[in-house]
Image (spheres, grey):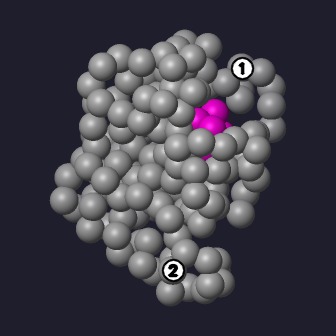
């Protein structure tokens, strides 16, 4: 099994999209990027902790590649929007790939470059950060699988 971690705005929608991918064994909403000290949603939502809302994915690389996960990531948020996705604003909603090894880093950088060259976003700059993974702090239980539990279609706009 392997681990991947992505931040693309509100973690409810990010988690929802990754749960749909065959080969993804689990998708857990949480926080990363602001240090080792455990944090709560109430702290992170202020934008003052340095953490991003993320989803940590456990996946079987025999069934789904990291590159395929990157494609889901790029497809389901706006990587040109700095610290904002939809109505959610603040550094906690930044677009970020937290890589867990050098292979993930290389694949993330290559896919970001390919997306920039594709022209999909025109002249807009892709602002997605690609940074080393840090301590993952799972979000509170009520955040996990939120979309399904509340019968919502999604909280993201597919781009």
Name the residue nearer the viewer: 126 or 109: 126
Decide: few, some or many residues near mark 2? Use Cα within 10 Å; few <14, some 14-19, many ≥20: some
- Position of 117 with respect to 124 (left or right) is left
Q: What residue span does the magenta drawing correspond to?
A: 9-15
For mark 1, what is the residue?
149
- Would residue 144 appear left or right of 97 to someone viewing this image? right
Q: Secondary structure at mark 2?
A: helix
Residue at the farthest front position: 48
Q: State which mark lies toward you, 2 or 1.
A: 2
Q: Quadrant of the N terminus?
A: top left
Q: Residue at x 73, y 57 (%)?
A: 158
Residue 135 on the magenta span: no
Which residue is drawn at the image coordinates 62% and 60% (left, top)? 81
The residue closer to the viewer here, 129 or 89, is: 89
Q: Position of residue 113 (x, y in %)?
A: 42, 78
Q: Are marks 2 and 1 in contact (CB under 8 Å)?
A: no
Give the vertical position of 135 relative to 77 (above or below): above
Which residue is pictured at 61% across the width and 14% down the height? 142
Which residue is tagged 2? Answer: 116
Q: Main secondary structure of the magenta part?
A: helix
Q: Is residue 16 above or below residue 159?
A: above
> Can the viewer see residue 55 in this picture?
no
Residue 88: percent from the left, percent from the top? 69, 41
Q: Secondary structure at mark 1?
A: helix
Residue lying at 44% horizontally and 72% vertically, measured from the top left: 112
Label 1 Cα crowd, 10 Å radius (few <14 / some 14-19 / many 20+): few
Task: Give residue 59's position: percent from left, percent from top.
Answer: 38, 42
Residue 10, by quadrant, is top right
């Amino acid at each position: 099994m392997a681990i991947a971690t992505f931040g693309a705005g509100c973690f409810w929608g990010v988690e929802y999209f990754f749960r749909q991918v065959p080969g993804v064994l689990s998708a857990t909403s949480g926080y990363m990027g602001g240090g080792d000290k455990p944090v709560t949603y109430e702290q992170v939502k202020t934008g003052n902790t340095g953490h991003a809302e993320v989803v940590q994915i456990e996946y079987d690389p025999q069934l789904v590649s990291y590159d395929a996960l990157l494609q889901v990531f790029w497809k389901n948020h706006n990587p040109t929007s700095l610290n904002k996705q939809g109505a959610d604003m603040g550094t906690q909603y930044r677009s970020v790939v937290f890589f867990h090894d050098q292979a993930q880093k290389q694949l993330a950088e290559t896919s970001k470059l390919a997306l920039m060259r594709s022209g999909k976003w025109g002249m807009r700059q892709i602002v997605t950060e690609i940074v080393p993974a840090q301590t993952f702090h799972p979000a509170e239980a009520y955040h996990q699988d939120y979309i399904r539990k509340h019968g919502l279609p999604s909280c993201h706009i597919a781009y």
